[in-house]
């Protein structure tokens, strides 16, 4: 028992313990310091990247508000250089919207696909999926729209998904399926949702068929 050891014996035991385990403790301390230093360096790097992306994003919005064509160039820059930031998602949406206005569905679908495969946010991926489905419906590609709506990342969007499914079924002349999808969407959408009147009108139109 250590309480019965002489002072000299206790000192010798401590020396032996340090000799046996000292190197392991030292290596452990060095590893902990290295990990902490590396973590702080990585965190600072991520912060700098996010700040730079935010600056480009802000400039992009300013240019877009001024109808400056450079806004699209800035959006592409965000996606190419800062793809891991949320700003890249928003840039892809901006490019897609510009493409839709120009009736360039191919580019719009490419941008929505990029968001679906790269965004870290489930809700953002779901929005991209619904918007891509609507572009496909506008292009008279009902089956492609239904296929992309088969995957659901965020159940909070189920009402909008079912409404889009209803539109795709209607395009495919599957009236009964369209009616069922619209009915589900009405049950799923919040009562305050602004799209409910339009959805109710779609359903009412089917009732006359």
Image: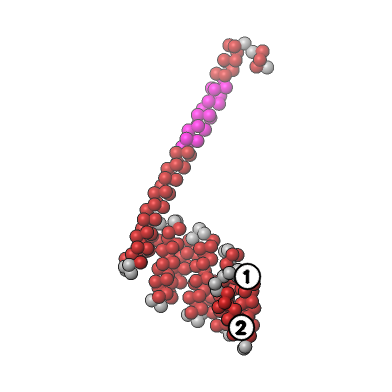
- The percent position of residue 106, horizontal first and vertical second, equals 43, 74
Q: How far apart are the two marked residues, 2 and 1, measured between alpha carbons?
A: 17 Å
Query: Does 44 appear above or below 166?
Result: above
- Determine if residue 143 is in view: no
Residue closest to the far bottom: 209
- Which region of the structure is painted magenta? 16-34
Left or right: 121, with 79 as reference point: right
Residue linked to disc 1: 188
Residue at x 48%, y 39% (from the top left corner): 35
- The C terminus lies in quadrant: bottom right
Q: Is residue 25 magenta?
A: yes
Q: Magenta stretch: dominant SS?
A: helix
- The percent position of residue 22, horizontal first and vertical second, equals 53, 25
Residue at x 55%, y 78% (from the top left corner): 198
Task: Tell which of 97 and 61 is nearer to you.
Answer: 61
Left or right: 173, with 140 as reference point: right
Q: Is residue 107 magenta?
A: no
* Secondary element at image label 1: helix
Left or right: 147, with 4 as reference point: left
Residue at x 62%, y 11% (from the top left corner): 6
Residue 204 is labelled as: 2
Residue at x 32%, y 66% (from the top left corner): 70
Within 10 Å of disc 1 (Cα), the crowding (few <14, some 14-19, many 20+) is some
- The percent position of residue 114, horizontal first and vertical second, equals 46, 65
């Amino acid at each position: 028992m250590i309480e019965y050891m002489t002072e000299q014996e206790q000192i010798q035991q401590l020396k032996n313990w340090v000799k046996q385990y000292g190197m392991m403790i030292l290596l452990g301390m060095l590893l902990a310091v290295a990990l902490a230093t590396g973590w702080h360096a990585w965190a600072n790097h991520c912060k700098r990247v996010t700040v730079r992306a935010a600056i480009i994003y802000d400039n992009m919005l300013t240019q877009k508000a001024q109808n400056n064509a450079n806004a699209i160039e800035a959006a592409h820059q965000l996606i190419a250089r800062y793809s891991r930031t949320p700003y890249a998602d928003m840039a892809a949406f901006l490019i897609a919207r510009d493409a839709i206005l120009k009736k360039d569905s191919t580019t719009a679908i490419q941008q929505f696909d990029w968001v679906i495969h790269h965004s870290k946010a489930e809700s953002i991926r779901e929005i991209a999926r619904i918007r891509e489905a609507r572009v496909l419906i506008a292009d008279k590609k009902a089956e492609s729209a239904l296929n992309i709506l088969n995957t659901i990342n965020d159940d909070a969007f189920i009402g909008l998904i079912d409404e889009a499914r209803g539109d795709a079924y209607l395009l495919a002349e599957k009236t009964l399926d369209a009616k069922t999808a619209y009915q589900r969407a009405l049950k799923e959408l919040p009562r305050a949702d602004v799209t409910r009147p339009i959805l109710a009108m779609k359903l009412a139109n089917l009732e006359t068929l």
